[in-house]
Amino acid sequence: MADFGGSDLDAFRTEARDWIEANFPKSLKGKGGMMMREERSEPTPDMDAWRKAMGEKGWGVPTWPTQYGGGGLTPAHGRIIQQELGRVGAYNPIGGMGVMMFGPTLLEYGTEAQKQQHIPPIVKGELQWCQGFSEPGAGSDLASLQTRAEDKGDHYIVNGQKIWTSGAQWAQWCFCLVRTDTTKKHEGISFVLFPMDVPGVEVRPIPLIAGNSPFCETFLTDVRVEKDQVVGPVNGGWTVAKRLLQHERSGLSGAGGGGGGRSLVKLAKDYVGVDEAGRLSDTDLRTRVIMNEIDGRAFQLTAMRAMAESKANSGPSAATSIMKNAGTRWMQDRAELTIELMGHQGLGWEGDDFTPEELGAVRSWLGGKATTIYGGSQEVQNNIISKRILGLPDPK
Amino acid sequence: MAVLNEEQTMLRDAAKSWVQEKSPVTAFRKMRDSGVELGYDANAWNEMAEMGWAGVIIPEEYGGSDFGYLSMGLILEETGRTLTASPLLASGLAAASALVLGGSDAQKSEWLPKIAGGEVVGALAIDEGAHHAPEKVALKAEKSGSGYKLSGSKSFVLEGMAAGLLIVSARTSGQPGDTDGITLFLVAGDAKGVSRKRLHLADSRGAANITFDGVEVGEDAVLGEVDKGHALLEKTLDRARAGLCAEMLGSAVQAFEITLDYLKVRVQFGQVIGSFQALQHRAAKMFTDLELARSAVEAALQAIDADTPDVPELVSLAKAKMGDVFHLVSNEMVQMHGGIGMTDAHDAGFYMKRARAAEAAFGNQGYHRDRYARIQGY
Ligand SMILES: Cc1cc2nc3c(=O)[nH]c(=O)nc-3n(C[C@H](O)[C@H](O)[C@H](O)COP(=O)(O)OP(=O)(O)OC[C@H]3O[C@@H](n4cnc5c(N)ncnc54)[C@H](O)[C@@H]3O)c2cc1C
Ligand SMILES: Cc1cc2nc3c(=O)[nH]c(=O)nc-3n(C[C@H](O)[C@H](O)[C@H](O)COP(=O)(O)OP(=O)(O)OC[C@H]3O[C@@H](n4cnc5c(N)ncnc54)[C@H](O)[C@@H]3O)c2cc1C
C-alpha cells in the first residue's frame, strides 16, 4: 500500500470526484435507500452499470487488497470515497453480508485458494452471501448449535436446521457453522461454505411483524460440503465465528448512526406545530425529542472519538464496545418518537390516506425492533461489556 | 384487583370463559387475515350482545342492565387479553355514555335499546386531525330550515365502518380551539351526505375517515345543548378513555404473562433465560408497573360509577400510566422473545401494534400528563 500524505489525499479527492462524476448514472441520484431495502426488486440497467463500474474499480471495498480486486487504499482514502459519493447523492452499490462480515473474516482466516475463489465476486457485487449461524435452540447461546457435519473422507455431509437466515432466498452462497465434534461445545464447531443451490438445501421465508419476509428457515438434508470449503481449522470454527460477529456488530453500530429521512425536529415541527418563539408547542414531546437529539449527538461524537482513538492506538478503542447498544437504543427511541409525533397518521399500515413517509415510519419502527435482537442481543452485548470490559465475574 | 360484588364476579367469569373459548388471539388473527372491512367478526359481536355486554352501562328502562363502568371494565379487560376486536368500547360504552349523559327521553328511547341489543353500533366522530384534540372542531353545523346542515370531516373514527349512529361534534359558533360553540349531533350512519373510508391501521381494527357533505338533520338531532357540547363531550370521552384503559390493562397483563411463561421455558446456556437476573429484574419491574396501572384504572372506573368530581384527573392519571405500561410491556415482549418475537406468526407483534393504537386513541400519554397537570393547576 502506497504511503499517501495530506496533499496526496487532496489529489485523491479530485480523482474520486472526477471518476464518480464520469461513472455514476444521474438517474440513480438519491436512490441509495432502495439498495438498503430488504425486499429486492430487479435492478435497472443503470443500477447494473453502476455496480459493475464500482466493482471493476474496487472502490466498493476500498481497503481490501488489490490482488483480489479490492481498492488497496487506506481507511482515509475510503472515507474520501464515501464523502464524495454522498456529495452527489450516489451510493455504494457493493454491500451485503459478503462485504460487511464474511469478506473481512475470510481475508483473515481463509486459505489463498479460498480468497481467490470467493473475494473477487464479493468485490464486484456479483453474488450474495447468507449467514447460517442461528438455530431454533441456539440463538444467544450460539455455541450450543446442533447442525451435524459427518466426515465422509473427501467431503462432509451436513444435516440440521438453521433459522432467521437473512436473505437466504436470494443468496447464492452460505457461510455456516456446523458441529464436527459432538463431545465438545465451542471446540466442536467448524466454519464451512456451500452454494445454496446444492441438493438438500431448502429455504422457507418467514413473514415478519413489519410485513416483509427478509429471512428464512433453512433446512439442510444430506448437504455435501467440500473439505476445501472449511474456513480455519476443523473444530476451530468458533474463533472464526467470533471474529465474524465482531465485524457484524461494528457494521450494525454504523447503521445505528445513519437514520436518514427528515430530522426528528423537522417532523415534530410539522406535525405538532410551534409557539411564537419557535419552540415545539407540545412541551412533553419537546423534552423527549431533545433527549433523543442529545443521545444522537453523543453517539456520533463517540463514533468519531472511537475512530480517532483506534487510529492513534492502532487497536480498537474501549468505546467501540458500547456502540451497538447505544446506537440501536437511540434509533429505536427515534422511531418510537416519530410514530408518536405523527399521531394517528403514524399508525398507518397501508392505503392512500397515509403519505409514503408515514407508512415508512411505521414499517421501520417495527423492523427496527430486530436491531436489539440480532448481531448479539442488547442483553448479550451488556454481558460482554460487563465481563470483558468491566471485569465483572459470573454469578456463583 | 378491586373488590367485586356478586354480579361483577359473575360477569367477569362469564367474560373470561367466553373469551378463552370463543375469542382467543387466533380469532383476531383470522379476522385480520380475512381483511373484513368492519374490522371485527360480526358473529362474535352478536354473541357478545346476546350476553348483554353492550348494555352494561345502559339503564334497565332502556334495555340495559345498569351494572356500571367497573363492570364494563371487567369485560373489556377480558376481551383485551386476547385482543378481541369488537364495537363494545365504541358503542356499548362511548356512544351509550353520550346518550345516557346527554340524551333527551326521546333520543334515549330511540337509540339506547338498539345499542344495548347490539343491533346498532354507535361511534364517536370527534377528532379531525392527526392528534386527539376535542376542542379543535372545524366541522360546521349551520342552521338550515328547522334543523342543521353539517359539513366537514372526521378522522380516525373507531368502528366508523360499522357505525349506524354517529355522535358528531360540530361547531355552531366560535373558532376551532374554542370550547364554547361546540354542539353534539346524532347522525344516522346512512344519512344522505355521509361517506366513509376504511383506514388500514397497524392494529387491524375498524377505523374510518368520515366526511359530512351538507348532511341535513332536524333540531331533535342535537344532543344536549347548542354551543355547550364541550362539557358533555369531555364527560363522554372520560368514560371512553377509562374503558379503553381497562382493555389496555387486559392486553398488557396478557402480554406480560405470555412473556413470563416464555422466560420459564426458553433455554439458552443450559438454563431457562428467566434465570438471568438481567431479565428477572425487568420482569419484576413490569409486574410492579402493572399493579400500579391496575390501581389507577380501577380507581377511574369506580370514580365514574360514584360520579365523584375527580373523574377527569383520575382518568388522565389512568390513561397516562396505562399507556406507559402497555408501551413498555409490549416492547419487552418482543425483545425477550428474541427472533421469534419478530415473526408475524407470533402474537407479540399484535400486542405491540395494538399498544401504539390504543396509546394514541383519546389522547396519548403526553396529552394526559399535560391534562393532569392543568386540572391540578400547574
Ligand atoms: C431480523 C433478524 C435477522 C437475523 N438474521 C440472522 C442471520 O442472517 N443469520 C443468523 O444466523 N441469525 C440471524 N438472526 C438471529 C439472531 O442472531 C438471533 O435472533 C439472536 O442471536 C437471538 O437469539 P434467539 O432469537 O434465539 O433469542 P434467545 O437467545 O432465545 O433470547 C431470548 C431473550 O433472552 C435474552 N438472553 C439470552 N441469553 C441471555 C443472557 N445470558 N443474559 C441475559 N439475557 C439473555 C436475549 O437477549 C433475548 O432477550 C436474525 C434475527 C433477526 C431478528
Ligand atoms: C449474534 C451474536 C453476536 C455476538 N457478537 C459478539 C461480539 O461482537 N464479540 C464477542 O466477543 N462476542 C460476541 N458474541 C458471543 C458472545 O460473547 C457469547 O456467545 C456469549 O457471551 C456467551 O459466551 P459463550 O457462548 O462462550 O458461553 P458459554 O461459556 O458456553 O456459557 C456461559 C455463558 O452463559 C452465560 N451466563 C451464565 N450465567 C449467566 C448469568 N447468570 N447471567 C448472564 N449470563 C450468564 C454467559 O454469557 C456465559 O458466558 C456474539 C454472540 C451472538 C449470538
Image: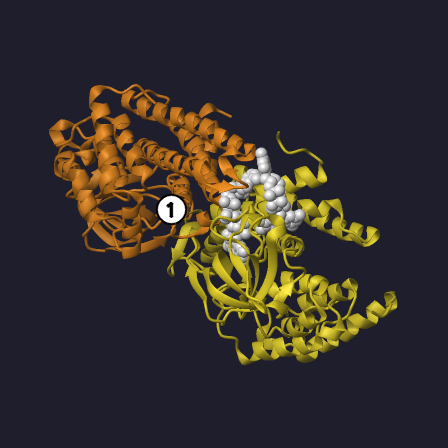
Chain colours: A yellow, B orange
Horizontal side of residue B188 vs A378, given as left or right:
left
Residue B298: image quadrant is top left
Give neighbour class at mark 1: few <14, some 14-19, many 20+ (Cα, 10 Å): many
Classify A371 as above or below A78: above
Residue B90: image quadrant is top left
Classify A99 as above or below A163: below
Residue A353 position, x and y percent, is 38, 58
Identify which residue, B70 or A94, lies in the foreground: A94
Identify which residue, A5 or A266, lies in the foreground: A5
Q: Label 1: which residue?
A: B347
Classify B34 as above or below B330: below
State the SS at label 1: loop
In the image, what residue type sits under mark 1? Asp
Residue B100 position, x and y percent, is 21, 31
At 27% from the left and 51% from the top, the residue drawn is: B31
Q: Is residue B35 visible?
A: no
At 39% from the left and 24% from the top, the residue drawn is: B295
Residue A103 position, x and y percent, is 66, 65
Horizontal side of residue B239 vs A168, given as left or right:
left
